[in-house]
Amino acid sequence: MAKERIDLEFAIRSAPGILYNRLVTPGGLAEWFADNVKLNDEIYTFVWEGMGEDAKLLGKRDHEFVRFHWMDDDEDDTFFEFRIKIDQLTGDVALLVIDHVDDDEVEASKQLWEKQIGKLKMILGS
């Protein structure tokens, strides 16, 4: 099935370093993204309801972005990414979420990301 790229942007009231920590560390990700997160080398295991899914860390840059690829996804060019954007004039922080999802799951995926980022905002007090 073909994948479609989705790009979402969320205003976040947080220092970039604090936000970045929640996007790249197992403890930070376990606060809002999954029930538990384990890291072994560059493989993150995200656990939901007792079931784990592995994602490889493709790249990261401190306080800027982190990119993952689901290990069970056969398409090499798909990924999900968290990117921190800072407005140069106002200093406002935004979180960009980039994901690749099946064509028939676009709306459900957008709703899931909105729910998850809502949890992140609550944790950050945003």
Image: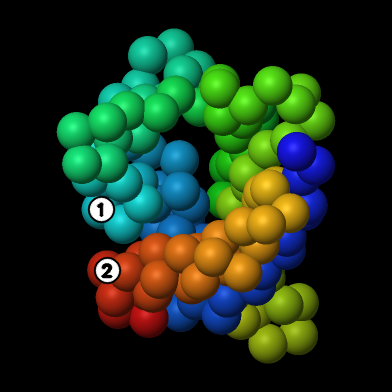
At label 2, counting other C-alpha atoms closer than 10 Å, the crowd grade (few under 14, some 14-19, many 20 or more) is: few
* Count of numbered tags: 2
What separation in Å lies between label 2 and label 1 (alpha carbons)? 8 Å
Q: Of marks 2 and 1, which one's residue comes earlier in the chain?
A: 1
Frontmost residue, 11 versus 53 = 53
Name which quarter of the figure residue 24 lies in: top left
Residue 125 lies, in percent from the top left, at 30, 78
- Label 2 secondary element: helix
Left or right of residue 47: residue 11: right
At label 1, counting other C-alpha atoms closer than 10 Å, the crowd grade (few under 14, some 14-19, many 20 or more) is: some
Q: Is the residue under label 1 in contact with that under label 2 (CB below 8 Å)? A: yes
| Above or below, comparing residue 4 to residue 12 in the picture | above
Which residue is at a point 56% across and 22% down the rendered structure image?
72
Frontmost residue, 78 versus 97 = 78
Residue 85 lies, in percent from the top left, at 68, 66
Left or right of residue 124: residue 76: right
Residue 61 seen in the figure: no
Which residue is at a point 40% across and 48% down the rendered structure image?
21
| Above or below, comparing residue 109 to residue 3 in the picture | below
- Label 1 secondary element: helix
Please state which amino acid type lies under the numbered disc 1: Glu
Left or right of residue 61: residue 54: left
Residue 102 seen in the figure: yes
The disc at residue 31 is 1
Which residue is at a point 46% across and 19% down the rendered structure image?
43
| Above or below, comparing residue 33 to residue 76 in the picture | below
Residue 60 lies, in percent from the top left, at 62, 35
Please state which amino acid type lies under the numbered disc 2: Ile
User: Where is the N terminus found, in terms of image quarters?
Assistant: top right
Frontmost residue, 27 versus 15 = 27
Left or right of residue 49: residue 72: right
Q: Mark 2 points at which residue?
A: 123
